[in-house]
Amino acid sequence: MRKVARLSRFNIASLALGLAFLYLPILILVLYSFNASRLVTVWGGWSLRWYHEFFNDRAMIEAAWMSLRVAVASATVATLLGTLAAVALSRGERFRGRTLFSGMLYAPLVMPEVITGLSLLLLFVALNAERGFWTVTIAHTTLTMCFVAVVVQSRLGSLDRSLEEAAMDLGCDPVRAFVAVTLPLIAPAIVAGWMLAFTLSLDDLVIASFTTGPGSATLPIRIYAEVRLGVKPEINAICTLVIALIAVVIVIASLASKLSSSQGESAAPL
Amino acid sequence: MSSRRIFARPARFAAIAPYVWMVLFFLVPFAFVLKISLSQTAIAQPPYAPVFDVTAGWDALKAAFAALSVDNFKLLGSDDIYVFAYVRSLTVAITATALLLLIGYPIAYGMARLPKRWQAVAMVLVIVPFWTSFLIRIYAWINILQHDGLLNQVLLALHLVSQPVVWLSTDTAMYIGIVYSYLPFMILPLYATLAKMEPALEEAASDLGAPPWQVFWLVTFPLSLPGVGAGVLLCFIPIVGEFVIPDLLAGSNSLMIGQTLWLEFFTNKDWPVASAAAIVLLVVLLLPLLLYERLQKRQLEQGR
């Protein structure tokens, strides 16, 4: 009797409903971004009108540019720091302050963004730092390096250590063994970490609101301001563009991990 | 000395840069929150007093410490707005987490029962919305839930209602938004434990004559408890501090603590009280945060 383990009708229904719930709202949004009608809810035929509107909206374009710059800069620094942190945690055995270190790396993952944002703003004010690109980038780096560290660390944890040990037995010093053997093996996780950091930064509203200054709003801040005033069809177009950008990023990430997984083991899930 | 030990030393040096960064931009900022929560409110820029000045010498430092007060915390306890906000935040988080568990469990269970190849596809399908902007997903629901939105159009067309239902700016809308945004956080840890489970255990129970609901309740569910714990914590903690979803989807009559904090900070410019509110929020969340960290550690150790 293998009744239990098999896929029941209930399983299929709950899966299908769950996925429909996750995807329908996004599909509807994308569909309506091509709507010619000014009324968001009335279908007036296909049109690129709202995309045109977005590309003529200087404030929105500036915000999008700011968001992109912050996302690239913070994701890059975060990947560097996060990877170092992951290496230290999974290969460094015991060192002084290790518990504090791992605690600091896990806390931002779950802590409400309002608290992280508030505390960073208080720091920047106390330092008398001019708020804008740099402060948002620092804030995003702090948040996203923790995600990178978790992704890379889980990959390092599943790695067979005998590979590194073999390289060292053959005369590599630890640093060379890491660069020549470990780094290529965890490369997909590092790429995935960068992508995750990039999208998290692109997405963040709360922390950016706290740490940016007047005149340097990111895209989510602008979208949020517009949405609070009511639904505008132009927002549908911007959102669709962001979704498309993230889709491209995901495709690149999965290609990168597929490329390297064909050489070795399976890739990290994220 | 094993090669493993030799490797450990340079790996320790790798900690230096991220360590310094986290101390500077994570730990030190908290010291500021704590300090400002103990300061007096002032109509100035920055709006708190006294301002900490390290260069002023020891006596100035002592004077600054003497000026610290717990008035802001007393205010939080005596002001109904804050008490209500904390209670509401906890109520919303508990309700939403329960809903997430109820909705997420069958989905994760269905995923774990799929053939291996399809499991990977289903997992990607669950993760992708997590990569899509969270603000965009909330905005998508505003499109659907507004007065002349798609939901009301469908309900009217099906003659299920005779006139448009008010969805937007209600708690229903807020719960839909929260469940929608946090569903992947609930599904993934649940799926991780359910997929690892040995099917032979369920088969054995069923062979011994247990009806399906007993198999589930006595075997499957208890074995999935680590996943349940991780999913519940992963959703509960951030929902307590949630700001954007209730702001955009819920009515304006009762605020959650995240919104209250935001208003106090940006609109009232009362930074000391906002800081005190943040500290109380953190203390409220400390227990679940520590629980989460322990679970995370255990999972990492099991993964090895």
Image: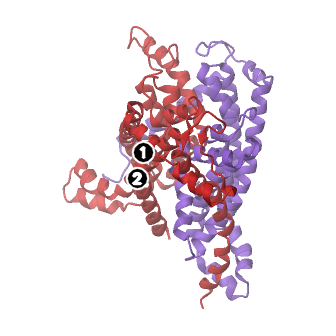
Chain colours: A purple, B red
**Tag of residue A17:** none
Mark 1 — on which chain does it sit?
Answer: B
Find disc 1 in the rendering and name its residue.
B236
Earlier sequence position, callout 2 versus callout 1: 1
Q: Is residue B41 above or below residue B68?
A: above
Closest to the observer: B107 or A142? A142
Asked which secondary structure carries label 1, the reply is helix
Closest to the observer: B83 or A10? B83
- The residue drawn where x is 51% and y is 50% is A110
Is the C-beta separation of discs 2 and 1 under 8 Å?
Answer: yes
Residue B300 is at least partly visible in this image: yes
Q: Amino acid at mark 2?
A: Pro
User: Local crowd at mark 1 within 10 Å, few (<14), some, or many (≥20)?
Assistant: many
- The residue drawn where x is 35% and y is 54% is A5
Choose top left, top right, bottom left or bottom right for residue B22. bottom right
Residue A258 is at least partly visible in this image: no
Q: Is residue B135 above or below residue A256?
A: above
- The residue drawn where x is 52% and y is 55% is A107
Quadrant where the N terminus of chain B lies? bottom right
The residue lying furthest to the bottom in this view is: B1
**Tag of residue B288:** 2
Choose top left, top right, bottom left or bottom right for residue A217. top right
The residue lying furthest to the top in this view is: B162
x then y, percent, for residue B69: 48, 46
Q: Is residue A185 left or right of residue B227?
A: right
x then y, percent, for residue B81: 41, 30
Choose top left, top right, bottom left or bottom right for residue A202. top right
Q: Amino acid at mark 1?
A: Phe
